[in-house]
Image: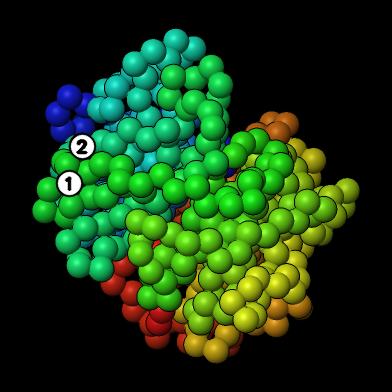
Amino acid sequence: MLAAACAGTPVASPAPSASTAQTDRPASASPSGSASSAAGDGVKTSANVKLVANVPRAAPLDGPMSWNSDLAFQGKYAYVGNFAGFTIYDISDPAQPQTVSQVSCPAQQNDVSVYGDLLILSIDEPRSGETCDSRSAGPDRDGAWEGLRIFDISDKKNPAYVSAVRTDCGSHTHTMVPGKDEKKLYVYVSSPGPEPDSKTCPPPHELIQIVEIPLKDPKSAKIVAKPNIFPDGQGDGAFATGCHDITAYPEKNLAAAACFGDGVLLDIADPVKPKVLQQVRDTENFQIWHSATFNNDATKVVFADELGGGGMPTCDSKTPKTKGANAIYDIAGGKLERRGYFKMPREQTAGENCVAHNGSLLPIKGKDVMVQAWYQGGVSIWDFTDSAEPREIGFFERGPAGGQNAIAGSWSAYYYNGYIYSSDILKGLDVIRIDDPLTDPAGQVTMDDFNVQTQKSY
């Protein structure tokens, strides 16, 4: 949750290539791209997990607040969002990722997804304009803009800005739902709000926004619906109303929305007119319903709670195991029924921000296994095949980043074609491998692309 374009094409600049870490001790790249020792990095892993490569952030995306954010994948490329823009990596050899291009386009949070030749960024910050050369609008928000930016990535070395769509309260995250006719792409915009004195985020805000992108004419993208998916009103979210994140499973005509104080199960057979199947709350354990993940059969949903908004040390003995954790819900008779909770089990120090954050399913038939980011808690791989008795099977983490309550660690950790890719806020892109009898079948599945908020069966 932590926390928005050029008159023409944004500046795309080459950056140092990856470093590798083939030994049991990880290594990270110097600015020149050569490998250097990381023995003092405080890395700890389970016996079945190894860091195989790290690519540090590089100029112009390496400033103090140029945090890495979300990830997306397409063929041999990984796309990494950053508060200062985004980077495209060639991951043909996961142990030797190569930087293809970087685009300077500042805004919070720049969460990224890709579809065909299009790349979409979520902007959750009032800017002076829609293009990449805009600046933060500051307290005077008259004329400010926030929402979605769209890029053409047909030339990976030179991504080109295409257009933007303004949305109320910006776009904290977004979810792609392909149209039935394959001519249109729908994007569900999730955003917190309202801000009563804001020009870009007026009340009320108990809704999501749906943007239609004609694939042959992305410049004409526009909002086509603002459905209110809260028939019973919205729960007492800690920060806002609206939704934080939505995961769609188009093949199943389902979506699960994590909406601050609520979890919502949706029928998306008509992508422009989602229908509410159920709305659930857990006021005892959950503070911020942050994200959702279906299992492959769409018989379960994992909802994550981002207690404290991502900036607090909640992975300690003082915080209950059901808070800042994952709740596993079975879908029984079309209804969500809570079965159990999972929380990363290693206690962190009082200076480490740690809470459940972005993760994805591993493609293993007959088993329910996730990899998940926990900020400074690192990366956890866990099995929820038994919904009532989830268990961790592997982990990777660094030591404290330094400084009391420093914002650091893994923002997103996703599995893609045999490897785990972790977008570390300060350290850059980590490539991690798990070798375990439970997870080995996942290596036999090849994905053509992967956007975590748009699930596909395997």
Residue 413 as seen in the image, left or right of residue 184? right
Q: Residue furthest front?
A: 231
Q: Residue at x 34, y 16 (%)?
A: 143
Asked whether the viewer can see residue 82, the reply is no
Q: SS at mark 1?
A: helix
Q: Are marks 2 and 1 in contact (CB under 8 Å)?
A: yes
In terms of depth relative to the viewer, which is nearer, 437 or 23?
437
The residue identified by callout 1 is 218
The residue identified by callout 2 is 163
Amino acid type, callout 1? Pro
Residue 389, position in %: x, y?
A: 76, 78
Residue 6: quadrant of the picture: top left
| Rendered view: 274 above or below 196 | below
Residue 358, position in %: x, y?
A: 55, 55
Residue 274: quadrant of the picture: bottom left
Residue 242: quadrant of the picture: top right
Q: Give the Cα separation between the discs numbered 2 and 1.
A: 7 Å
| Rendered view: 4 above or below 242 | above
**What numbered label is drawn on residue 130?**
none
Quick one: label 2 or label 1, which is nearer the N terminus? 2
Q: Residue at x 29, y 36 (%)?
A: 165
